Image (tube, rainbow, N blue to C red):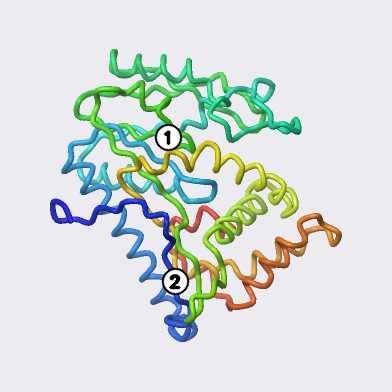
Amino acid sequence: MKGGFLLLKYNPILDQIVVPSFALEMEENPSAIVQKAEDAYHQKIQQVCDYILQEGRLMIFITGPSASGKTTTSQRIAQELTRRGKHVSSISLDNFYKCAAELPRWKDGYQNYESIEGLDLDHFNKTVSTLLKEGKAQFPIFDFSVNQRASQTIELRFDQDSLLIFEGIHALHPWISQAMEGYPCVKIYISVHSNFVDTSGQILLSARDLRLTRRILRDFTYRDTTADETFQMWDYVMMGEELYIRPYRQYADLHIDSAHLYEPYLYHDEILRALASSNHNSTYGAAIERLHHAYSYFTSISPSLIPQDSLIREFMKPE
């Protein structure tokens, strides 16, 4: 404890969510489990904001692997800081992507969306430098529908009473923070950091497969992407995490585990539906079978139980 709140440092040992310990309540009173999970996540946001304000941090760097919930978490932190009377500007590093033709490639020729070299760092550094020196700057907007920077920009302002949030998979990379040298910073790492296990500790659904589930459902719902297409991208995402994210998570001041108790129950029906769209001769048959087996341990709950402002809404079909 420091200053009356819990410091959430990253620990490489994953937490365990023991499913039988709440399975009966999930069956009889699922809304109570949902509320418990939502309250726990909200408390984490409160603790992070307590730390930011007590320590006088002006620059907030938020990162995490794919489908960790970092975008929604960044929004929640910004909202809470705003509620506490602070002016907050949020900067998505995704808006500094290079156009598709300029992206680096993996050895097999596939475009590498994971490397920091896919960001236009010169433009990023110049834009941030202008913001800090002049108090305002025009920030780009990347149009992913055409994989290039849009013609319109957005103006952000900054002064000593402002807070800046930088969010993206490379937010903890030293090449990003060097532009803010001299300003008090906080680095936050968010991930799914809990395995769902039985009473003997056997993993029923791993943290990584929960994240994969989130990604499949989000792609399936919002990007009209099949499970097979997500599986293919996931291989590159995993390589990118090992190369570009994991080496820097040790430098995070705070860590947020975004796993929610009720997630496997919520995803049960939709993930099976998404997997059913996969080709029967899919090269990802082993992964499909693994997910089918994992979700056989869970029943389903109604999406109507999930609050509209929940982080989990990022991965759900709109009602």
Q: Is residue 34 above or below residue 281?
A: below
Q: CA distance from mark 1 to mark 2?
A: 29 Å
Q: Which mark is residue 48?
A: none
Q: Which residue is mark 1?
A: 171
Residue 222 relative to residue 4: left or right:
right
Say which element carries label 1.
Answer: loop
- Which badge, 1 or 2, is on the more N-terminal residue? 2
- In this picture, is 1 found above or below 187? below
Q: Give the labeled residue for mark 2.
A: 17
Quarter of the image containing the C terminus? bottom right
Q: Report the amino acid beneath label 1.
A: Ala
134 left or right, relative to 277:
left
- Could you classify mark 2 by the number of other residues whose Cα lies within 10 Å: few (under 14), some (14-19), or many (20 or more)? many
Amino acid tagged 2: Ile
Please state the horizontal and vertical placement of residue 31, each as a whole percent of the image.
42, 76
Give the residue at x 35% y 14%: 130
Question: Looking at the image, is 307 positioned above or below residue 100?
Answer: below
In the displayed structure, would residue 50 be above or below residue 39? above
The N terminus - image quarter: bottom left
Residue 23: percent from left, percent from top = 48, 82
Left/right of residue 83 with respect to residue 278 in the rendered view: left
